[in-house]
Image (spheres, rainbow, N blue to C red):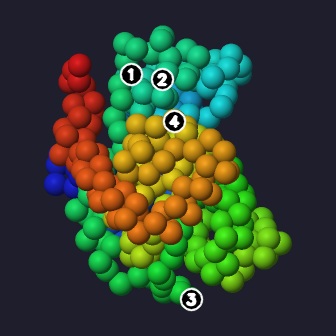
Amino acid sequence: MEMFRNSNIEMLYCSRSGSIEHSLRQRDIQHVPITELSVREIRRVSKDFDVDIIHAHDFRASVLAASSFKGRIVSHIHHNPSWIRKYGLNSITYLLATARFSTVVGVSHSVFDEYVFGDLLRQKSMVMGNQVDISYIRRQSERQAEETRDDGPFDIVFLGRLSQPKNPRRFLDIVEKVKRMKPDLRVIMIGDGELRAEIGAEVEKLGLRENILMTGFLDNPYPLVSKSKVLCMTSRWEGFGLAAVEGLSLGLPVVCTDCGGLRQIVDEMCGKTCRTDSEFVYEILKLLDDHEYYEEKSRQAELRSYEFDNISAYREQLEKIYLGDSWV
């Protein structure tokens, strides 16, 4: 939306109220609150504001838009949950909804490769990796960190929602194993979500309270990320893996699961994709203990991030979609 601030395309951000509102106010983006994501609410907003296009993010929003809106719909899929690999109610419902979409956008090829009906969408689907502005991330990292009880440095950072797809419980298991070798390990978890209370209790149970700082949601996490050494991602699935690019742009090697879009972002030069906890622990310990190994991967991380710096191209592609031009 910030990309189109000075264009002829007027945009509204529609969602339930919550922590996102503070970020929208800071960016002077108009927010239209809804009580719930439902057919009734989508109809109300589209009528009240005379909406021409709905840019629906993820599966549920896309299906509800198809059921309630007669104009053009862009379905933008950011992740690839396990159900897309199976013939079932969810995968079939989304397929039926695609008849109403003008374009289906996936953040990586894995979204369509793994979807059981992916071949049926080829005529109206395209891949657009998440928008990334490397210079913006680095500028933000130089600002004063939001107030926390600690401003680092940290050995490991977790950046993402505390939700099932990001698998923060596995992250704690890995940290607990690394701590056995490095008792003074310093870890920061940046993000909020429905599992926050559960993860907080697990931190206490595993004896990690002195090792882990949980910040909750931060408008600008980058100053604290930049004061960390390694970004660890334990996601069950990732459509793209934006947090990985953000970490790379600040020189952090990324140690992550071998899934989804992460396979196209992280390689042996800038980090490592892992299948087992033992692989995670070994790589993290090597990065923390071997200075030359770390410095080379950190240098390669920054270089790798530039390959995803795509703001101008991303805006151009979106504009073609909104205006109905051919993007092939």
Mark closer to the chain start, 4 or 2:
2
Q: Badge 3, how many Cα within 10 Å: few under 14, some, many 20+?
A: few
Left or right of residue 187: residue 28: left
Q: Which mark is residue 149?
A: 3
- Percent x, y of residue 184: 63, 81
* Number of numbered labels in the structure image: 4
Give the CA distance from mark 1 to mark 2: 8 Å
Mark closer to the chain start, 1 or 2:
2
Circle 1: element type: strand
- Identified at 65% across, 31% down, the residue is 82
Q: Badge 4, how many Cα within 10 Å: few under 14, some, many 20+?
A: many
Mark closer to the chain start, 4 or 1:
1
- Identified at 67% across, 70% down, the residue is 181
Q: 55 or 50, which is in the foreground?
A: 55
Mark closer to the chain start, 3 or 1:
1
Give the CA distance from mark 4 to mark 1: 17 Å
- Seen in the picture, residue 185 relative to 175 is either above or below; the reply is below
Residue 198 appears in view:
yes
CB under 8 Å between discs 1 and 2? yes
Which mark's residue is nearer the viewer, 3 or 1? 3
Q: Amino acid at mark 3?
A: Arg
- Identified at 22% across, 31% down, the residue is 320
Q: Which mark is residue 117?
A: none
Left or right of residue 213: residue 173: right
Q: Which residue is mark 2?
A: 112
Which mark's residue is nearer the viewer, 4 or 1? 4
Q: 30 or 160, which is in the foreground?
A: 160
Q: Amino acid at mark 1?
A: Ser
Q: Amino acid at mark 2?
A: Phe
Give the CA distance from mark 4 to mark 2: 11 Å
Q: Which residue is mark 1?
A: 125
